[in-house]
Image: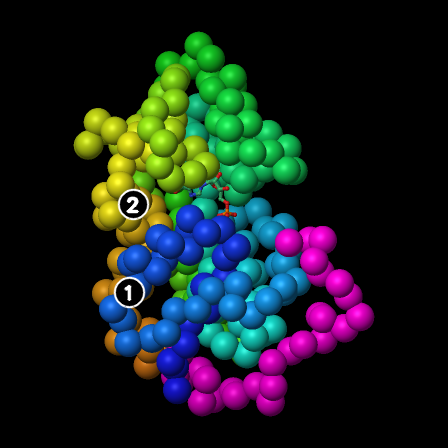
Amino acid sequence: MFTMLVIATNNRNKLREFQEILKGLDIEIVSLDQFGPLPLAIEDGVTFEENAYKKALHTAKILGLPALADDSGLVVDALSGRPGVYSARFAGEKASDDENCQKLLDELVGVKNRSAYFQCVLSLAVPSGPALTYVGRCDGTIIDVKRGENGFGYDPIFLFEEFGKTFAELTMDEKSRVSHRGKALAEVKNELKSIKKWVENRLNEERPAKPDHSLFANKDWSDEL
Ligand code: IMP
């Protein structure tokens, strides 16, 4: 039975957005936190699709439960699509949101074309491998000076023209209704009945004997979290 869905993210902001959108559904939504430290998935894909699938499958295999993961980022037209899949580490491996925003602003000094979009790919994988994929996109403009206190990442410099506000000036509810993640999740929500059936069929077809715990063997993961 498909009664529990693991959200494969350690990002609390994202988790809250997922929970907000999926609340009221007939499935228990659990987070990675509830399982203690887990080895991290290696996000070395070159597309959002690849990375989302890697994260979802990694979690599903370890926990023996269906898992939903996202990969998202900002695609800037004038930068030929950068930072794209490298959005989280645009200014360096451990860069902060502020540093990433600043690097983007620096690269766009004097650039007229400020159009950009956020893209989100969701992958819902079962432990045996198959997955469903959902995509959402939100178009906007990169402004010069940060505005707003909400959200995370590039939100303060991403202007959503329709509202005349940056993502950081929207409430979570407003952002969820129009964001890339919100749109991808809305599709999941719309198709929940068929998704549930699909997941149940996959779980019945190939029930793993037990979760794959081999990755835990003799390894302390605490410094990687
Ligand atoms: P991910 O966690 O691998 O999907 O990394 C995505 C990165 O893209 C984040 O660290 C942010 O920098 C950026 N990003 C993704 N979604 C959003 C959003 O909704 N607002 C602002 N930045 C975002």
Decide which of 206, 24 is in the foreground and name it.
Answer: 24
Picture residue at 37% right of the left edge, 14% below the top: 112
Residue 155 located left or right of residue 207? left
Q: Residues within 10 Å of mark 2 (few under 14, many from 20)?
A: some
Q: What residue sits 47% from the left and 64% below the top? A: 31
Report the quarter where the C terminus lies: bottom right
Report crowding for label 1: few under 14, some 14 to 19, many 20 or more residues within 10 A (C-alpha). Answer: few
**Amino acid type, callout 2:** Met
User: Is residue 81 shown left or right of residue 91?
Assistant: left
Which label was assigned to residue 112? none
Total labels drawn: 2
Image quadrant of residue 222? bottom right
Residue 182 image position (x, y, % from top left): 30, 51
**Residue furthest out toward the left:** 162
> Which color scheme did the rendering employ for the protein?
rainbow
Horizontal and vertical percent for residue 109?
47, 13
The image position of residue 57, as x and y in percent, is 55, 67
Q: Which residue matches tag 1?
A: 23
Q: Work out whether mark 2 precedes mark 1 in sequence or the reverse, and give the earlier one.
A: 1
Please tell me whether residue 70 is drawn above or below residue 98 in the rendered image. Answer: below
Q: What residue is shown at x 65% (from left), y 38% (from top)?
A: 93
Residue 19 appears in the picture as rendered: yes
Judged from the image, the secondary structure of the residue bearing numbered disc 2 is helix
Where does the magenta region start and end?
199-225
Describe the element under mark 1 as helix, strand or loop: loop
**Was residue 212 drawn as part of the magenta stretch in this picture?**
yes
Kindly identify which residue carries mark 2. Answer: 172
Q: Disc 1 residue type?
A: Lys
Residue 26 coordinates in the image, percent (x, y)? 28, 76
In the picture, which quadrant includes the N terminus? bottom left
Q: Is residue 27 magenta?
A: no
